[in-house]
Image (cartoon, rainbow, N blue to C red):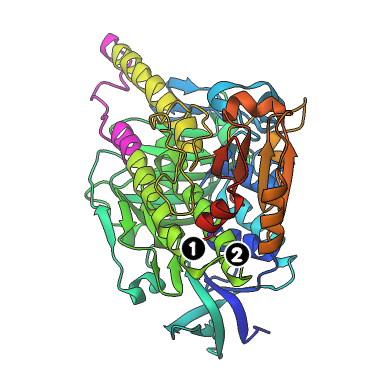
Amino acid sequence: MLPSNTSVMIVGGGPCGLMLANELGRRGVSAVLVDEKPSTAFNPQANATQARTMEHYRRLGFANDIRDLGLPSDFPTDIAYFTRYATHELARFKLPSAAEAKKKIHSLSGSWSAAELPHRISQKYVEQVLRQQAEKLSGISVNFGWRMVEFSDTGKDVRVLVERVEDGERREITAAYLIGADGPRSPVREALGYRYTGETGVVRDFMGGRMYAIYVRSPDFYKTVPHAPAWMNVCFNNERRAFMAAVDGKGEFAFHTQLKPHENEADITQEDALRMFQMGVGAPVKAEILSHGAWTAGHSLVADHMQKGRVFIGGDAAHLFTPTGGLGYNTAVEDAVNIGWKLAAVLKGQAAPSLLESYELERRPLAVRNTAYAKTFADSLGLYAPVPEIEEDSAAGRQAREQAGQYFEAHGRAEFNIPGITFGGRYDGSPAIVSDGSAPPPDAANEYTATACPGGRPPHCWLSADKSLYDTFGFEWTLLCMNPDNVYTSDFEEQAQQRGLDLTVVTAPQARDLYEADFALIRPDQIVAWRGNETQSANAIFSRILAQ
């Protein structure tokens, strides 16, 4: 039975909504989630979980559950470029398997010093874990097969009318806050009167305009194709351009192709979809079409606002990507991480309601940043067109393939080696950050320079062979104490106790050079909120961050 009252109403059961349910439930905040789909996703959708997202799954305690799903642990997560999958390989950007990533992470430094490496896994598997974890939590009610009909923000609460898809039964739920994580056609966003801004309708030779997704099962693929397996497979020819992610490493694939002007998506049959897939393979490989449908590439859109009163939007409802770089789903997860702790702090009386205004101030600029990066990758991939002779068995064909290979070698590194995008997102200027006047390093996609300049991800280091600094952080607030000769933390501890905050004090002298200060305060979303060499201003620091 759906409860008639809850603290937070979540509309949408994708990664953003399910992650928010986990963030709230772990903090003892009740939430009701509804989604009109019968269950979590069947189609593969997003296929890349970035390292920062994996760090958040580690914080919640289920990173290994995620990493154990999807591709076999020894399956290579390379990105490979071909004329067609069974013919010429043009280039390959090699990346570690899941098993290799678990071992390699402990020895990495510089841009890739992290608690977790990226993981290549279909969103369908991630959603299953997020749902299972959320449903374990007291006060969390997850309801697929229910849709939101309408809502009304009274100023004191939000009244939400929901309807069961199966039989039309309706219920009214009263919530303190509502979050629309209900996708690109978001009824919540539309009811708020907000619109996407940015760029749409971009047409490219590839990754622009009408695309077609085919979820296919073909165990014979690996018997037919003479090349080493890869996670992401891109085919580059004049007849059928496509990209294809391995879903399970055993023969299931998410195949996406550019539709030609003469191809009408409404007329495409199962047989047509099979031929499209076989064109990309370059061989009449046997296959079963599990699902197929059209979608549109060429979006780089961000809603003009993300909050009105007691109602918020996140995920695809707030920003829509062309899926190069794998940034859309990961940006959605961080939306949930950001708003989750803030809602909990306000509902528990630990922060003023105006803290919630920092959600849009922090997340919207990141959405603009990340959609711009995705557009750059889409341009690099989609505006580079194959020459007519690319598949010829001739000197001109060989030269064309060599040139294309060089291009894709560089493109692969640019799109898939992105620690700067992954770790470098910042909340500079936010009222929920206490600036120390320092400036962060320049934002760069393919390089990340660790900095404890308030407003960004905490610099990471390994404390032992298998213990990350992040593993010492509390689930809520953490005060890092990094000078063994300056261990005065009682002001922070007393202020936290008075405010009802859970503060973990961590002594980590190994991190002193990284943080360039004796102390650093880490927010619940693992963002550096403040750093300094004395703690007497704890009251003012917490008051600033918590909008008091």
- Vertical arrangement, residue 523 with respect to residue 11, above or below: above
- Going by the numbered disc 1, the residue's amino acid type is Leu
- Vertical arrangement, residue 457 with respect to residue 127, above or below: above
**How far across and how far down the image is residue 52, in percent?**
56, 41
Decide if residue 172 is on the left or right side of residue 236: right
Instruction: Give the magenta range.
Output: 375-396
**How far across and how far down the image is residue 546, in percent?**
54, 59
Q: Nearer the viewer, residue 302 or 118?
A: 302
13 magenta-colored: no
Residue 323 visible here:
yes
Residue occupied by mark 2: 345
Q: Nearer the viewer, residue 52 or 453?
A: 453
The local secondary structure at tag 2 comes to helix
Q: Nearer the viewer, residue 452 or 52?
A: 452
Lower position in the chain sequence, tag 1 or tag 2: 2
Residue 355: image tag: 1
Decide if residue 363 is on the left or right side of residue 54: left
**How far across and how far down the image is residue 355, in percent?**
49, 63
The local secondary structure at tag 1 comes to helix
Q: Residues within 10 Å of mark 1 (few under 14, many from 20)?
A: many
Q: Are marks 1 and 2 in contact (CB under 8 Å)?
A: yes
Tell me the residue at 37%/67% (across/down): 185
Tell me the residue at 44%/58% (across/down): 358
**How far across and how far down the image is residue 39, in percent?**
60, 67
Residue 72 visible here:
no
Q: How many marks?
A: 2
Tell me the residue at 50%/74% (across/down): 178
Decide if residue 301 is on the left or right side of residue 342: left
Which image quadrant is residue 323 in?
top left
